[in-house]
Every structure is written in C-alpha cells, then in structure tokens.
Amino acid sequence: MSSGAKVVSAVIRETTPGITPTAGSWSLLRRTSFGVKPTQNTNDNDEIGGDRMAQGVSRGTVDVGGDVGTRFRWNQHDDFLASCFGAEWINNVLTMGNGRITFSVATYAGDVGIAQIARGCQVGTFQMEIPGDGDITSTITFAGLDWETKGDDTSYFTTPVDTAGALRYSFKEVTNIRLNGVDGGTGFCVDTFNIQFNNNMQVQRCVGTGSAFAGANIQTTFMPSGQVTLSWSKAAWEVYKKTFTGETVPFSFTLENAEGKYTFDFPEVQISGDWPDAGNTDIVQVQLDITAANTPPTITRVPTVPATAISVAPATSSGAIGSTVNLTATLTPADSSDTVVWSSSDPAIASVVSTGQKTAQVTRNAAGTATITGKARTFTATSVITVTAP
C-alpha cells in the first residue's frame, strides 16, 4: 500500500534530449497532480483461429506524457515556460523561438520502493488559470521520448533541491491588467481569465529503431490563446465588437509578489465572443476568447532583490519657506528592487512626496526643523531639513 503524500516528484534539465544527465542537481517538482506516464497503444488482431475465440491484441506504440498540475510560484516554472516557448530567457525576457528544451521527470514512492522516469520530456502546452478567488494554477503538458520503471527500493534521483519560491501567486497578486488599452477595474472588471501557450506538438515515429516510443516530438504552430470574462460595459462592448472585424488589440497583465514579478504581454490578440445575457438577479458578463496573432507574446521576469542598507543624500539641507530640495536614497546592494518609503517628522514644516523608486522631493512649508526618513524594509536613513523665514 502506498500514500500519495509519500510520492516525491523531481525534474532535471537534459543536455541531450532523452538522456538523463549523470551530473547536476534535481529540482523538487511541487505539484497538485502528476499525470506523466506511458500509454500502451494496442492493435486489434482480426485473425480467425481454429474456433471462434478472440485472438487477442497486438502491442503497438507507446506514448509518454501527460499533465502536471501546479500552483504558480516564483522560479519553479521558468524552465518549463522556456521549453514551451522554445527559447532561453535573455536578460530576463522570454519570447518564441525554435529551440528544443527537454527534461527527465521522475517520481519515487518511498513507502513501497517503486520509481518511474520519463525522459526527453518537452512542454507541449502550458496553461494558467487566474481565478476570481484563490491561487493561480498552472497545468504543464509534457510529451516524452522514453519511460522506465523499477521496484528495487531505489530512486532515479538524489535528494531534490527545492528551488521554487516560498510564496504562491494568488488572484490578489494580479496587477496592471490591460485589454485594448483599458485598465481592468476602470473600464470594466475582469472576473476571471486563463491563458495557454500551445505548440500543437506532433509525434514523429521512427521505424527501424526497435523502439515503441516516439522518435521526436515536433513543435508546429505556436498558438497562445485564452479566455477573459469581463463585466458588461461600454469598454467591454468596444472589445466585443472586434469579433466581427478581426482587429487585434493588446492584452497584458503582471503577477507580482514579494519574491518577484512576471509581466505577460500579448501585443496582438484577436477577439471572439457571444452576446451576453443574464437573469434578473445576475450580473451581466461577457466571455471573450482571445487568440494571439502575428506578433509573439513576451514574458518579462523581475526578481526582487532585497535591500540590506540605505543612506540618504543630502543628509542636511537648509532653505527658505516655499523652496524645495530633492532627496536621493542609495540602497545596498545597488540593484535592490525595493522602493523607498518616505515620511516627515513634521509635514507642517517640511512635507515629502516620492518621485521614484529611490527619490523624493521635500517642500519647505514653515520655519523650523523636520526630519525626513527614507525606509527600505527595516532599514532607515534620514535627512534633516531646516526651513528659514524668507
């Protein structure tokens, strides 16, 4: 007997498709479901023997692949997205390419000592579901080239490293959602939406190899698409009308938490939808199908780099009522992504407003002295502002 809680999943990127690396670390695959497995295809045997008894079936090809369900986390999905897009991340930006990125994906049920491994696994489809409540989920559909299993109480992988972010992205971390140039929450409310990147993968069989597995999994047309559910409004109606013209509109959104952010940008999507209707106690909503066309989408990732120290310049400043002074914070490390929060000990004497990630402007309002504090995480630095009568 085996417990699902004791089945550990792990993944390692391959250098040569279908060959599991002998060196390198395996990454723990956090998942809600695991459907990567072999499927034995059979062929009917219509032979007629000495009586009317069925003659059995013949073993045919074996398909390897399936869906892995996950919660979307920082860093866990980056390589899978790269495999789906067929390209490497360059300067933290991913767009469509023609490369082939594959993985060995394995599980081990430690309580019964049974292991399996699928090799040459390429991401054929990557789907994301962004709900109106709860965590953002992803479904990764793999297509593999080989599969093996054993029951000798050993695993195909060493202890895997958990490289996924500690936080799950949820509906609350969706920001900057825009469709047809309109911000969600302004011209319309976005209730739910989903996206998928589909390679329309095709299997190449190779007779003469002696193998029942696929010889290659080949990407064909790259088709990003999805569905967006909007509250019915003039802005939503303007988008709906594109159903009949074929015009493209831009669509973008960002997922951002304390560990980093991903911005998904679809420069051109075509719209398709049905005229909405609702009952007398329902909210009218319109569900629109979106399909990317002409220009490939991009994903931009920005990791959060926490500050470990802060200083503010100038440390002191003096001036007359009505004058201003600009303050600049320096964060350590220099590439920290934190935004400095500013405050004044006495806004009636000197008030402060943020003008950028690390900058602020102070306005001298009345004679006296006030302290301006810049804060990044738990770290603070100050500037003493003296205001003199004109």
Image (cartoon, helix red, strand yellow):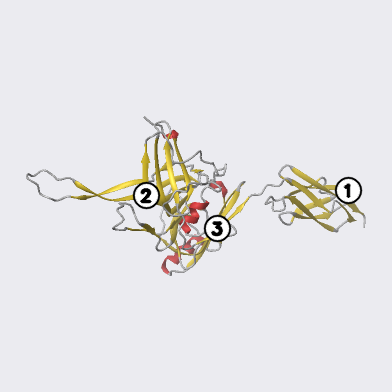
Residue that protrudes farthest toward the left in the picture: 50
Residue 369's disc number: 1
Distance CA(mark 3)–CA(mark 2): 27 Å
Q: Which sits earlier in the primary sequence, circle 1 or circle 2?
A: 2
Earlier in the chain: of badge 3 and badge 1, it is: 3
Instruction: Specify the farthest residue to the right.
Output: 389
Task: Return the residue nearer the eye: 276 or 151.
Answer: 151
Name which of mark 3 and mark 2 comes first in the sequence.
Answer: 3
Q: Residue at x 54, y 41 (%)?
A: 162
Mark carried by residue 146: 2
Q: Quadrant of residue 272?
A: bottom left
The answer to whether residue 184 of the structure is visible from this angle is no
Q: In the figure, residue 321 lies in which quadrant?
A: bottom right
Q: Which-is-in-front pick, marks 3 and 1?
A: 3
Residue 64 is at least partly visible in this image: yes
- Using residue 268 as the reference point, say whether residue 52 is left or right of it: left
Left or right: where 61 falls relative to 34: left
- Badge 1 amino acid: Thr
Q: Position of residue 45 (x, y in %)?
A: 17, 50
**Count of numbered circles in the view:** 3
Marks 1 and 2, how far apart at CA:
73 Å
The residue positioned 53% from the left and 58% from the top of the image is 88
The circle drawn on residue 89 is 3
Element at label 1:
strand
x and y percent of residue 232 in the render?
Answer: 48, 57
